[in-house]
Amino acid sequence: MPKPSFPSSKDPGSLDRRLQFYGDEFVFDSVSGMFYRVNPSACFMLKSLAAGTPVADLPARLQARYELDSATASRDVQLFLNSLTALEPLGRLFDPARGAP
């Protein structure tokens, strides 16, 4: 399965410029104008990605933050990425075949 690619922080559509966080529950996508309700761990992962954390580092960061075992952290990251790629229009950030917004 191909790994998702994320826009770089220099890209005008990058996550750090595109997403605005409201606490640990709400995320606003300034490109689409849509709000998303997320759980605290999803917010943590989105903030990490927006700050430039590579996808491969997410399980270790999640494990450290929430005191999870390695298998659980890896599974949670994969479930998060699967859910995120299914979203419109945020999913377009993570699946180049679907086109940029």
Image (tube, rainbow, N blue to C red):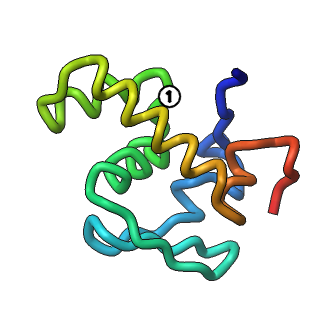
Residue appearing at x 39%, y 28% in the figure: 75
Q: Residue furthest left?
A: 67
SS at mark 1 in the image: loop
Relative image position of residue 73 (x, y in whole percent): 30, 28
**Foreground of the two, 88 or 100:** 88
Relative image position of residue 66 (x, y in whole percent): 16, 37
Task: Please indicate whether residue 65 sits to the left or right of residue 21 in the image.
Answer: left
Task: Please indicate whether residue 7 sits to the left or right of residue 43 in the image.
Answer: right
Q: How many marks?
A: 1
Q: Quarter-wise, where is residue 17 in the image?
A: bottom right
Relative image position of residue 44 (x, y in whole percent): 32, 49
Task: Identify which amino acid the numbered label 1 is placed on.
Answer: Pro
Relative image position of residue 74 (x, y in whole percent): 38, 24
Task: Please indicate whether residue 20 sits to the left or right of residue 99 in the image.
Answer: left
Q: Quarter-wise, where is residue 64 in the image?
A: top left
Q: Quadrant of the C terminus?
A: bottom right
**Foreground of the two, 73 or 57:** 73
Using the image, determine if residue 41 lies above or below residue 20.
above
Q: Residue furthest bottom?
A: 33
Residue appearing at x 47%, y 39% in the figure: 79
Q: Residue furthest top?
A: 70
Q: Residue under circle 1?
A: 54
Neighbours of disc 1 within 10 Å: few (<14), some (14-19), many (20+): few
Using the image, determine if residue 54 lies above or below residue 9.
above
Residue appearing at x 71%, y 57% in the figure: 12
Using the image, determine if residue 94 lies above or below residue 69.
below
Q: Quadrant of the N terminus?
A: top right
